[in-house]
């Protein structure tokens, strides 16, 4: 069987929702200074971070992407 290399837009949006809930729980628990919330992502994690930060910019003060890309779904999110 061949390895699966593409992720569907639905899977990306589902990952966004899981990551949003995680970030919201961490922020509620630790109550960090909002100006100190920086997202850092590498490769596919960077792609998730890139699209999430475009969709929910209020979650981050800044982001750093390493060897990454911005998925097309970031620009076509129907929500």
Image: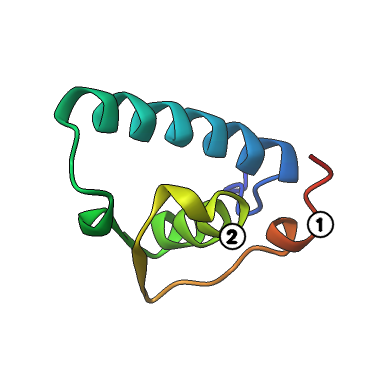
* In the displayed structure image, the side of residue 42 where residue 20 appears, left or right: right
Q: Furthest-bottom residue in view? A: 67
- What's the mark number on residue 27? none
Rendered-image quadrant of the C terminus: top right
> What colour scheme has been applied to the protein in the rendered image?
rainbow
* Identity of the residue drawn at 66% across and 53% down: 6
Q: Gap in Å between the C-alphas at discs 2 and 1? A: 11 Å
Q: Image quadrant of residue 62?
A: bottom left
Q: Is mark 2 on a helix, strand or loop?
A: helix
Image height check: is 61 above or below 77?
below
Q: Which of marks 2 and 1 is in front?
A: 2
**Circle 2 sits on which residue?**
54
Image height check: is 66 above or below 15?
below
Nearer-the-camera pick, 26 or 74: 26
**Circle 1 sits on which residue?**
76
* Identity of the residue drawn at 73% across and 64% down: 72
Image height check: is 23 above or below 39?
above
Q: Image quadrant of residue 19?
A: top left
* Identity of the residue drawn at 73% across and 45% down: 9
* In the displayed structure image, the side of residue 64 where residue 20 appears, left or right: right
């Amino acid at each position: 069987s061949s390895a699966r290399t593409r992720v569907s837009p639905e899977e990306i949006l589902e990952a966004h929702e899981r990551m949003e809930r995680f970030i919201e729980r961490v922020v509620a628990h630790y109550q960090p200074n909002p100006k100190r919330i920086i997202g850092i992502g590498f490769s596919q994690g960077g792609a998730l971070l890139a699209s999430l930060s475009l969709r929910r910019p209020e979650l981050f003060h800044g982001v750093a992407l390493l060897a990454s890309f911005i998925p097309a779904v970031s620009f076509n999110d129907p929500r």
